[in-house]
Amino acid sequence: MSLDRNAVISAAERLVAQRRIRDAIAEYQKLVWDNPRDVSALNRIGDLHFRLGDLSEAADLFTEVAEFYAREGVFIKAISIYKKINKLDPARLGVYEALGDLTRSRDCFRKQRLSYEF
């Protein structure tokens, strides 16, 4: 039996509206268990942990999301998520390295693409 993604999201958002954040996290976790590549659910779970004040867990989840985007070559989204992590926890030194690597990769990709246009 397949998981009804829309029903799970609706249930989770109802729980958020009721300020039952931990229960909402459990609902979103169902999506991740069903599809471990569901980065939008991981990102939302990270946002909810942030609302609870659990910054370390939020940063860990955001790191998973950023690494996924980086592996997929979606550099702008990866950079954006790493910047989000940096605001949460500026002491995570690996974030600075990842941002530098991604910026270089993005710039190289741009230059390569521009060279094909001429």
Image (tube, rainbow, N blue to C red):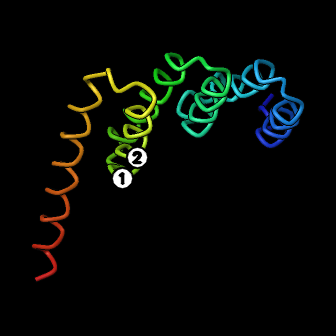
Q: Nearer the viewer, residue 32 or 17?
A: 17
Instruction: Assign a secondary structure to mark 1.
Output: helix
Q: Nearer the viewer, residue 92 or 105?
A: 92
| Left or right: 21, with 106 as reference point | right
Q: Quadrant of residue 85?
A: top left
Q: Looking at the picture, how far across and down is residue 53, in whole percent? A: 62, 20
Q: CA distance from mark 2 to mark 1?
A: 6 Å
Name the residue: 80% across, 43% down: 6
| Left or right: 83, with 44 as reference point | left
Q: Quadrant of residue 14?
A: top right
Q: Looking at the picture, how far across and down is residue 59, in whole percent? A: 47, 24
Find out whether the residues at labels 2 and 1 contact each other: C-beta distance under 8 Å.
Answer: yes
Compared to 114, does 44 lie above or below? above
Label 1 amino acid?
A: Ile
Label 2 amino acid?
A: Ser
Q: Which residue is mark 1?
A: 76
Q: Looking at the picture, how far across and down is residue 82, in whole percent? A: 37, 37
Q: Quadrant of the N terminus?
A: top right
Q: Which residue is mark 2?
A: 80
Label 2 CA crowd tier, 10 Å (few <14, some 14–19, many 20+): few
| Left or right: 54, with 7 as reference point | left
Name the residue: 32% across, 47% down: 73
Label 1 CA crowd tier, 10 Å (few <14, some 14–19, many 20+): some
| Left or right: 30, with 10 as reference point | left
Name the residue: 46% across, 29% down: 88
